[in-house]
Image: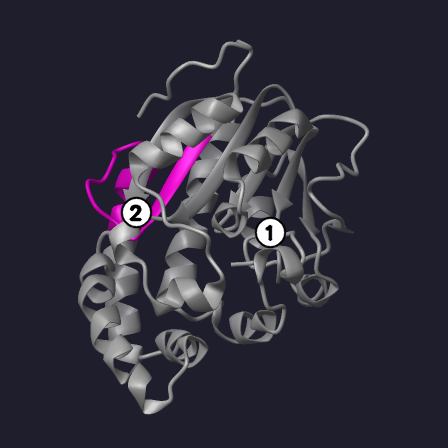
């Protein structure tokens, strides 16, 4: 939930880094997402020539960078974020290069082969413009791997607290990628096992907001580690990840994962599912 725009522009609160750093290593949601990203990144980068460069945009606390390093053993992995607060935590987790910069002011003189953007795009008011900036940083046939929150109908206090601009349907994300000049190779919902918890749990929790509980308080409450639920969800989501790693698309989920390549056709076509 980190990103690379100023709070004045997108409303992100860098104090969230502290809360995230405290739970990311234990909470089932982060564990499952990280394992999925690792599996997908390994699969799609296995054919690249050694020495390729991988950048995570909006790397925040460095939670995912460790998994990208494990997946991309023949590449150079780097992290970029605007917030020094997040990068200070990232330096405690990884030795890979970390860059404090604004995505819109490309700090690289050479093109990149792989860019990851994980639960970041939803923070940008103009997502197509952001994707176009990503495209310009990629080499020909360069790869973009990203995750975003799924299901506009699931919008809740959590999205308000996280300062999201939107949640995506699969069709929405596919069309945004195509408009920005990408060809989608894989696009699926994930976190299917978490869907019932989010669909039923967030409306119930939201009813307590009249008891002086803010959206931020409710969001932090949702990130608590509940041992029995945490262990069960880890096992269920591990099974889902095995399917997704084989490029099996799931019909439902609270998040979306997409793999897309920079299109070489300036007349951008429709996205494939």
Q: Quadrant of residue 176?
A: top left
Q: Name the residue under label 1.
A: 65
* Residue 230 shown in magenta: no
Camera-side residue of 261 and 14: 14
Q: Mark 2 points at which residue?
A: 190
Image height of 227 relative to 198, above or below? below
* Residue 256 shown in magenta: yes
Residue for point 47% across, 49% down: 122
Residue for point 64% across, 32% down: 133
- As helix, strand or loop, the secondary structure at mark 1 comes to helix
Q: Residue furthest right?
A: 109
Q: Quadrant of residue 262?
A: top right
Camera-side residue of 127 and 225: 127
Q: Quadrant of residue 213?
A: bottom left
- Residue 1: x and y in percent read 51, 59
Instruction: State which tag comes first along the sequence, 1 or 2.
Output: 1
Task: Write down the region rendered in magenta.
Answer: 239-259
Between label 1 and label 2, give the one nearer the viewer.
2
């Amino acid at each position: 939930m980190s990103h690379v725009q100023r709070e004045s522009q997108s409303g992100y609160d860098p104090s969230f880094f502290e809360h995230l750093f405290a739970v990311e290593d234990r909470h089932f949601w982060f564990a499952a997402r990280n394992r999925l990203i690792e599996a997908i990144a390994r699969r799609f980068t296995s054919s690249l020539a050694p020495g390729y460069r991988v950048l995570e945009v909006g790397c925040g606390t460095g939670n995912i960078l460790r998994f990208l390093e494990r997946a991309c053993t023949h590449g150079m992995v780097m992290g970029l974020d605007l917030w020094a607060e997040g990068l200070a935590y990232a330096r405690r987790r990884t030795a890979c290069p970390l860059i404090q910069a604004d995505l819109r002011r490309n700090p690289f003189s050479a093109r990149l082969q792989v860019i990851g953007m994980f639960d970041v795009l939803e923070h940008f008011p103009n997502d197509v413009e952001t994707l176009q900036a990503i495209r310009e940083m990629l080499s020909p046939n360069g790869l973009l791997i990203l995750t975003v929150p799924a299901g506009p109908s699931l919008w809740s206090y959590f999205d308000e607290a996280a300062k999201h601009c939107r949640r995506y349907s699969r069709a929405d994300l596919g069309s945004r990628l195509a408009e920005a000049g990408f060809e989608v190779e894989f696009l699926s919902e994930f976190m299917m096992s978490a869907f019932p918890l989010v669909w039923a749990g967030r409306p119930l929790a939201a009813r307590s907001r009249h008891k002086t509980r803010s959206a931020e308080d409710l969001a932090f409450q949702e990130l608590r580690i509940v041992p029995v639920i945490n262990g069960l969800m880890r096992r269920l989501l591990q099974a889902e990840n095995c399917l997704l790693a084989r490029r099996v698309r799931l019909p439902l989920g609270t998040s979306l994962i997409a793999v897309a390549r920079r299109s070489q056709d300036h007349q951008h076509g429709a996205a494939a599912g």
